[in-house]
Amino acid sequence: MKKLNFFLLTSLLSVSIAAQPLTRVSPEDVGLDSKRLSQADFVIGESIDNGTIPGAVLAVVKDGKMAYLKAYGNKSVFPLKVKMETGTIFDLASVTKPMGTAISVMQLVESGRLRLTDDVKMYLTGFDGYRDPDTGKEIDIRIIDLLTHSSGLPPYAPARELAGKHDSPNPKALLDYISKCKRDFKPTTKFQYSCLNFITLQYIVEMISGMTLADYAAKNIYDVLGLKHTLYNPPKEMFNMIAPTEIQSDSTVLAGVVHDPLARVMNGGNSGNAGLFSNADDMAVIAAALINGGEYEGKRILGPLTVKTMTTVPEGVRELGRSLGWDNYSSYSSNLGNLFTPSLTYGHTGYTGTSIVIDPVQKVAVILLTNRVHPYDKGSVVRLRALVANIVAGSVIQNPEVN
């Protein structure tokens, strides 16, 4: 028993040790052209100069190494001007969906706890399917329909209205609302981006695991990889490392508190649609693990077949362009740019101005973190994301398939 206890203790200690950031190399060391790559500095600087964003962090991962990491502009401009740093932590907003919720769901799939084709009502009692208006038949919504945004659930829920009717936060009230709200179309027939899909997935993860999504993801993803700056509801001692978001009515700014209203007001920061905070170094480790079939420095979060399934658009919804938590070629995929490997490249964006692009063929990841909603929710980074993706893709001068 003493030996077993010692083994358990050493195992826990081993996963709690912070992972080393990706090895820093020059762009040329991994087949990138540094002169071409540096053009990103200009377009990001342009966005800062015209007031679209206060600042940004750009990270480029190639072949499991950090080929480019740079901070631009300011982390905050209100109430004080503070310079951006490469280690700045950002509110990832909807990048939470793939890097928190979807990875958690796929772990449960590969451990035999659920199937992608399982009906949601198997796990959430009273969860309505879609009622066919012509036949009256109920068509169940499945896990895979949630992951691909083809479920028919509405895009969002009235956070203020729900908060006015219930105590806040109140995850149960939000689940009750989602379980019975109007379904907009028959599952798999259309694509409709919906935060409610991933909040529903959150509740399924929590029901199966007996843990909050935040605790499950920390234990099974971020702690395994040794990440120390990727978490939900960061403690106050980390607030000075976090890029603030929007000015509130009381003239304070949100910093360390999730910007998304449903995640903040109804789910208390532990939410499937938003709520994850991270920085470029930590996100680069996750990206490197995914590119490497789910493993980084001997620490595995997913199996290779699981990663491939997760990042491939499924049969039956090929025309919709969404894989399991990721965007491959839907109408929301402009951040992937025009030059990376078609259909196989995947990524996601966040409302606050965050984004990630991963080309598994070229083994490249582009992480662009901005706090475009600071101090006022006015700036747009839609074009900037695509420009940066194209610049990085254009800097690839050595194809790994040729080596």
Image: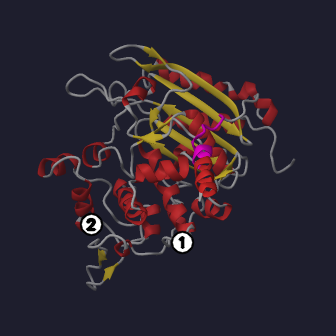
Q: Position of residue 356 (x, y in %)?
A: 55, 42
- Residue extending farthest to the right is 403
Give the class, few, some or many, for how many residues have Cα within 10 Å of label 2's Cα (few <14, many ≥20): many
Quadrant into which the N terminus falls? bottom right
Residue hosting label 1: 112
Q: Which segment is the magenta one?
A: 12-21
- Percent across and percent down for residue 400 are 80, 47
Q: Are marks 1 and 2 in contact (CB under 8 Å)?
A: no
Residue 338 in sight = no
Q: Residue at x 42, y 64 (%)?
A: 146
50 is higher (above) or lower (below) than 113: above
Left or right of 357? Residue 167 is left
Name the residue: 75% across, 38% down.
396
Q: CA distance from mark 1 to mark 2?
A: 25 Å
In the image, what residue type sits under mark 2? Answer: Ser
Mark 1 residue element:
loop
Residue under pointer 2: 179
Q: Residue at x 69, y 29 (%)?
A: 37
Asked if residue 289 is among those painted magenta in the image, a careful observer would answer no
Can residue 206 be seen in this snapshot?
yes
Identify the residue at image location x=47%, y=68%.
144
Residue 242: x, y in percent? 43, 28
- Residue 296 left/right relative to 126: right
Task: Give coordinates of residue 361: x percent, y percent.
Answer: 72, 52
The quadrant where residue 293 appears: bottom right
